[in-house]
Image (cartoon, rainbow, N blue to C red):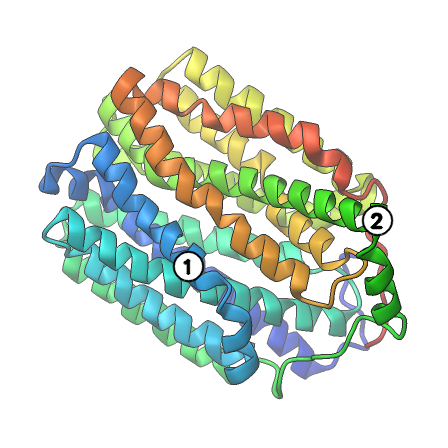
Amino acid sequence: MNSSLPPSVPRAHRAARAAVAVLFLTNGAILANLLPRYPQIKADLGLTNAQYGLAVASFPFGALMAGLAAGAIIRRFRSSRVAVAGTVLTGLGLLLAGLAPSWATLAVTLFLAGSMDAITDVAQNAHGLRVQRLYGRSILNSFHALWSVGAVVGGLMGGLAAGLDVPRGLHLGLSALLFSGVSLTALRFLLPGPEPTGASGPDAHSAGASAKRGAGRLRLVLSMAALVLIASSGVLVEDAGMTWAAVYLSGTLGASVAVASFGYVALVGAQFIGRLFGDRLVDRFGQRAVARTGGALAALGMGGALLFPSVPATIVGFAFAGFGVATLVPAAMHGADELPGLRPGTGLTVVSWLMRLGFLLSPPVVGLIADAAGLRLGLLVVPLAGGLVMALAGVLSAKRVTARRGG
């Protein structure tokens, strides 16, 4: 079975897989600790929806600016070390954001935290793909599932801290210290040695040359664009939960601060379930069918919650959206990394970088719509993203992911 662990996998490789899973968990938990504090930060600084959206957009803007540097940094210092160092620096940046005394300081600190998070994200995915190649089968969804676990843990921690009115500096400082320590412990179990630099096969050069001519080159560009949009749709839905779920539930629907945190927790919790079974679903039905079904769930679930607004319906709607987009980012990364004519890692870097446009554009766009027509209308971006995935899913493979032994 694809879900069983082959007995031939060495202990060091199993340890490396566990360590990468820990990195994904800490990455999700550190950011999620800040999210339930957003409404309080917004109120303390007296921000409008548009100002708040622009400040939050500094995080993905920093990620976009730093993303292309990740490859060079990883080649110089190794993906293992970069992922752990980025985790520590991201936690520090988010602590400073929680203590920001003004809109400008909030924007700058979120920009710096986003820059570190982008480099961490590429590094941990690159190291995860190294481990996956050693396993000879798909395990990338399981890493992203652990990210969702971390996000749930962090969201619950942040919601509890907000409900108990724990000072933000104390709360976020302890969070950064805890998860930085966990990631530093994981470092010693990651794979040793430099990053692989070889091409994907003996014919990679000639395949790349032919793919860059005529229709082959156009097909490559269109396929990459579709994969970026699929990944961006996934992160746009995630951002709607991160940035606006607590604000919408507490501000528009009148939920308490503690209850409002469950919008994002429901999204990432359902996302975890989807990713936990993602490899099996893709193996049975193919990435294309899974993505289209997920897009429909996100569109119908969140669309229904916005059509009939209430606190329980909205929490359920975010859960449907999270489950629907669970496999989109791993599927887009896998598809981009398999595109003919590209060196290993090139497609992953491009998708990881460009998909952050979803995080960059979503907060200010939703904020501007919310100021003009209400946040309920602004959150229509979620069902629209689901519809876009349904339209573009044809670029994904319709076949099961086959195991690749060896190497």
Badge 1 amino acid: Met
Q: Nearer the viewer, mark 2 or mark 1?
A: 2
Q: For residue 65, which numbered disc appears in the image?
A: 1
Q: How crowded is mark 2: few (under 14 residues within 10 Å), some or many (20 or more)?
A: few
Horizontally, residue 210 falls left or right of residue 47, namely right
Q: Which residue lies furthest to the front in this view?
A: 214
Q: Position of residue 202 (x, y in %)?
A: 89, 75
Where residue 85 sits, quadrant-wise, is bottom left
Horizontally, residue 295 falls left or right of residue 28, namely right
Decide which of tag 2 and tag 1 comes sooner along the chain: 1
Badge 2 amino acid: Gly
Residue 246 vs residue 380, the one in the foreground: 380
Q: As displayed, is residue 135 above or below residue 366?
A: below
**Residue 143 visible, this angle:** yes
Residue at position x 62%, y 85% from top?
194
**Which element carries disc 1, helix, strand or loop?**
helix
Q: As displayed, is residue 108 above or below residue 215?
A: below
